[in-house]
Amino acid sequence: MRSLPLFQISITAAVAAAACAKAQPPTVGAFVDADGITRIYGNSFGRPGYHATYDYIIVGGGNAGNTIAARLAEDPANYTVAVIEAGSFYEILDGNRTQVPGYNYINTITFPLGDETPLTSWGLTTEPQAAIGGRTAEYGQGQTFGGSTASNYMGYHRATVGTFDQWAELLDDDFWTWDNVYPAYKQSVAFQPPDYTKIDPSFNISYDATAFIPTGGPLHVSYGNHQGAYGPSLSDALAASGLDPIDGFNSGRLIGYGTATATIDTRTATRDSSETSFLQAAARAGIKIYPQAVVTRILFDEDKKATGVEVQTNVATGQLKYSLSATKEVILSAGVWHSPQLLMVSGVGPAETLQEHGIEVISDLPGVGQNEWDQPVIGLFLNLSVETNTQFQVGNPEVVAAAMTNYLENQSGPLSGFGTGQGIAFENFPESVRSDFSNSTLAYLETFPEDWPEVEYLPLANVPVGEIPITPYDNFILLAAVLLSTESKGNMSITSSSVFDRPIINPNWLATDADMEQAYAAFLRLREISSNWDTATGELLPGLGVSSKEDILDFIRGHSGFIFHGTSTCKMGPQDDPSAVIDSRARVYGVTGLRVVDASAFPNCPPGHPMASVYMYAEKIAESILDGN
Ligand SMILES: Cc1cc2nc3c(=O)[nH]c(=O)nc-3n(C[C@H](O)[C@H](O)[C@H](O)COP(=O)(O)OP(=O)(O)OC[C@H]3O[C@@H](n4cnc5c(N)ncnc54)[C@H](O)[C@@H]3O)c2cc1C
Ligand SMILES: *[C@@H]1O[C@H](CO)[C@@H](O)[C@H](O)[C@H]1NC(C)=O
Ligand SMILES: *[C@@H]1O[C@H](CO)[C@@H](O)[C@H](O)[C@H]1NC(C)=O
Ligand SMILES: *[C@@H]1O[C@H](CO)[C@@H](O)[C@H](O)[C@H]1NC(C)=O
Ligand SMILES: *[C@@H]1O[C@H](CO)[C@@H](O)[C@H](O)[C@H]1NC(C)=O
Ligand SMILES: *[C@@H]1O[C@H](CO)[C@@H](O)[C@H](O)[C@H]1NC(C)=O
Ligand SMILES: *[C@@H]1O[C@H](CO)[C@@H](O)[C@H](O)[C@H]1NC(C)=O
Ligand SMILES: *[C@@H]1O[C@H](CO)[C@@H](O)[C@H](O)[C@H]1NC(C)=O
């Protein structure tokens, strides 16, 4: 058995992957050359402690930040670009934990909530959430190059035609119509079709090949090299529950059931993050990277133009404080909680809050930190009569050994997949449960485009099994429902003028009647799907004993979970919307030289998982900048 040095693998993969790679060595981090000597590429990195000037400064090397950095730095623009990231490299800090897809059950803080605070996460905690029994939750956010793409569940899919046609209407800017965003989604992605020497050919995955282009990249999107054995029977259960098959979730349609793609590079069976894809490409284009560098403030001149940032790099022996200048723009890509925090501590936000903390008001924007969209999750733990990943997770020695050999020798088996994929489904609540909705709930749901599904059903084979007693022979799965059209909106605020004090996070999950009605309906649908699922041999949590409406609502309050899809805390909107923070090209109102480009910029959270749309959003704003807007 070969033992693979995975950091090296990831870098090698990225070299071959990058659209602009011409058999050059990578230039980020370390690289093992042909003689087996580790080379460190200092030229990829900025010098901490020294002032320097760039055309564009990107704050946050996450999902959006690395993407826009790469596009601005590449030919023909060749702008000088710096990426400033609070974290470091997850391959260095975290071993192989987030690289190996099948280990995502350790990474993903999900239902039931774990209490991990790994070195690559911010360890944020919410305020007590009244509607769910006063519980608090850890809110997952990556702190590393790659950001949340370095530790998320890797599910990749796109939103719908109606979602973006509605954005364009809301923003009065055709830049955001589906026809205009679809090419940008495609541009990021190098698609790898299913490899049936590794995936069981009987799965015969149906997908729309026109959703991808041969020139796309550098991000690899695939089905992994493994699909769970539960897929075909779950698909049958979804069909029996009234859903229709669909050829994947990347062509602007979601309603139906099918097989989801993931950000896994099948050649090495490792996670492709925005670091292994876009940042590696950008480094070759000559950008400068600042690891372990926290941006503490955005700097403005007297004309309210953003001129640079104040930075603090922490090293073992102390703190280095310095500033960096931007001749063109500062681009804020610090994520849903930290972008609004940085705006506020820099003088952009609700005037009252800023004054309370002694911060000089540069632009009074009451929408900063408001309007947060999120997607609560409820789920059933089921016992299956086919193999899931439970035994692997609990450490059944034979199962673990087989999975390791399969992965290291063939890059296949459960470690090479993300633990879901087949039998993902989206729908609008059918009449059987919809008939119980109140008129005001129905009226709220009417505000969404027709092709925007209200709920997603998501089988998760890689989740911590939590409170259920397990034997080494069990095969459990979480069948989750993700609510995509909830009414309550979250918010955040600051406790001081320092970014080192954690923001106050209030997702306000399930806080309205409309949300609880939908959660209850979703629970009933999960029960129906599970009752149609031949290989589901029992409901372990909550158990069929929980059957009255009262008990089910109690279960939802006590057990709803979260998948960290928060968006819109610096929302894009028209000038006459008092809660808008940025215009339709992500420029912050009331100042110049400053954009927000990340999930916080979305006017709403597109249905489903946001990562693909974050990549697309960064591609679109890069396109706008390169066009002179
Ligand atoms: C556990 C988990 C699982 C998920 N699963 C999925 C999934 O399967 N599919 C999917 O589509 N979506 C998933 N998501 C959501 C998705 O990953 C995020 O919505 C998306 O990646 C956010 O991108 P972003 O660019 O807004 O922020 P991020 O990618 O989080 O990047 C923000 C970056 O800014 C840095 N930063 C913050 N403050 C500062 C500062 N002051 N100075 C310097 N740097 C700073 C951070 O360290 C971070 O690297 C998941 C999220 C989590 C947390
Ligand atoms: C940008 O850089 C590339 C690679 O270094 C170079 O080939 C190209 O000519 C440059 N483009 C411009 C417009 O300077
Ligand atoms: C991942 O790292 C752990 C800890 O070093 C090691 O035990 C395990 O074998 C590695 N897994 C793979 C797939 O290489
Ligand atoms: C796979 O499915 C397609 C339809 O989606 C069908 O045409 C084809 O015959 C199937 N192939 C196998 C091997 O079952
Ligand atoms: C799960 O189902 C299997 C049969 O597939 C059964 O042997 C086992 O006892 C069940 N486990 C639990 C916890 O119900
Ligand atoms: C690797 O794949 C080959 C060819 O499919 C197969 O014969 C072999 O058994 C696999 N090895 C492991 C360890 O699964
Ligand atoms: C809800 O709407 C229906 C049809 O529009 C109407 O008949 C009914 O009276 C309304 N119910 C309530 C409680 O307002
Ligand atoms: C956030 O929402 C909660 C619940 O509605 C509210 O009590 C709180 O004041 C809000 N905070 C901010 C900063 O708007």
Image (spheres, rainbow, N blue to C red):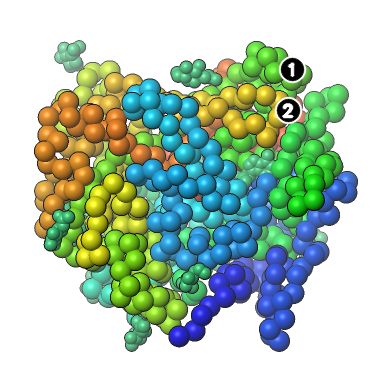
- Please, which residue is most extreme toward the right here? 51
Q: In the figure, is residue 202 to the left or right of 86?
A: left
Circles 1 and 2 in contact, beta carbons < 8 Å: no
Residue that mark 2 sits on: 346
- Location of the N terminus by quadrant is bottom left
Q: Earlier in the sequence, mark 1 or mark 2?
A: 2
Q: In the rendered image, is residue 226 in sight?
A: no
- Which residue corresponds to mark 1? 358
Vertical side of 578 occupied by 189: above or below? below
Q: Amino acid at mark 2?
A: Ser
Q: Nearest to the eye among marks 1 and 2: give it.
A: 1
* Quarter of the image where one finds residue 392: bottom left
Question: At which x and y percent is residue 512?
Answer: 33, 21
Packing grade of label 1 (10 A; few <14, some 14-19, many >=20) is few
Instruction: Identify the residue at image location x=71%, y=86%.
Output: 35
Q: Residue at x 33, y 73 (%)?
A: 397
Front residue (pair 451, 200): 200
Mark 1 and ligand 8: say if the CB distance to the nearest ligand atom is below 8 Å: no
> For numbered disc 1, what is the local secondary structure?
loop
> Percent from the top left, x then y, of residue 61?
65, 50
